[in-house]
Image: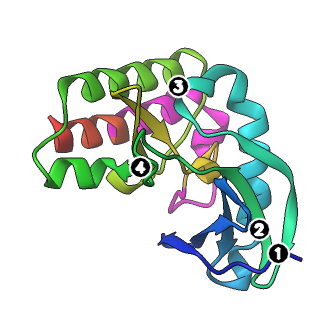
Amino acid sequence: MLVLQKFIGKGATRICFEYPGRPDRCVKVAVRCRDAAKLETELAAYCSVRSYLGEFIPVYESPLVDTNLGKGLVCELLRDDDGNCSKTLADCRSTGGVAAELISQLKFFGYHLISHDLFFYDFNLQNFMVQIKNGKPYLKYTDLKSFNNYKSWTFLKLEKLLPPLARHLMIRRLNRILSQVS
C-alpha cells in the first residue's frame, strides 16, 4: 500500500499526490468514496484515446493502486525543465496571458477530438496544463473522466445516440475555453 504524503493539487472530485519515490508520477485519489469509480472511468478513457491524443495527454499506468486514501490512479506528473510541476492554463492566463502557440495547440487538440469523434465535455482552464520542455510550451489535457460522459439534464442522453449533437456540445465548450484564453 502506498502512503501518500506530498500533496500536489485538488480538483472537484480528486486530489493529486506525488507518487512516493517516483517524482515523475502522481497518484490521483477520489475526494469522496462515491467518486472512486471515476478513476476506473478515466483509466478506460485513456486506453481508448491514447493512440489519437498521445501528444496532448499524460501517460497513465494500469492498474489502479492501493493507497492509504483508497484506490489511486497513477499517471505522469507533468514537470517543466526546471523540475517544478507544470502550471495550469488558468495560471498562465492570470500571469501575463496565453501565448499564441498554446492557443494554436488548443485548436489543434480540438481538431483531433472532432476529427476522431472523441467526445469530451469537461473543458476548463484547470484541466489543461502547460508543460515547458526544452524551453517550449506544450499543452496537456489532464481530465479524461468526461470522455463520452456529458452530464445531460435529460434522461435520454441523446448526445450518446446522435454524434452530431455530441459534436455540437463539445465544440460549444471548446469555443468557450478558446474565448477565455484569446
Alpha-carbon span between mark 3 and mark 1: 35 Å
Q: Name the front one of labels 2 and 1.
A: 1
Q: Which element carries disc 3, helix, strand or loop? A: helix
x then y, percent, for residue 68 = 79, 85
Residue type at the position of mark 4: Ser
Is residue 57 toward the left or the right of residue 104 in the image?
right
Residue 153 in the magenta stretch? The answer is yes
The C terminus: image quadrant: top left
**Earlier sequence position, callout 2 versus callout 3:** 2
Alpha-carbon span between mark 2 and mark 4: 21 Å
Contact? badges 2 and 1 (CB < 8 Å): yes
Which residue is outermost to the top? 115
Figure check: 22 above or below 80: below
Residue type at the position of mark 3: Leu
Residue at screen point 19% across, 40% down: 181
The N terminus: image quadrant: bottom right
Alpha-carbon span between mark 2 and mark 3: 27 Å
Alpha-carbon span between mark 3 and mark 4: 23 Å
**Earlier sequence position, callout 1 versus callout 4:** 1
The span picked out in magenta is 151-172
Residue at screen point 65% across, 21% down: 52
**Earlier sequence position, callout 3 versus callout 1:** 1
What residue would you read off at disc 3?
113
Q: Residue 86 carries which label?
A: 4
What residue would you read off at disc 1?
2
Q: Which mark is residue 181?
A: none
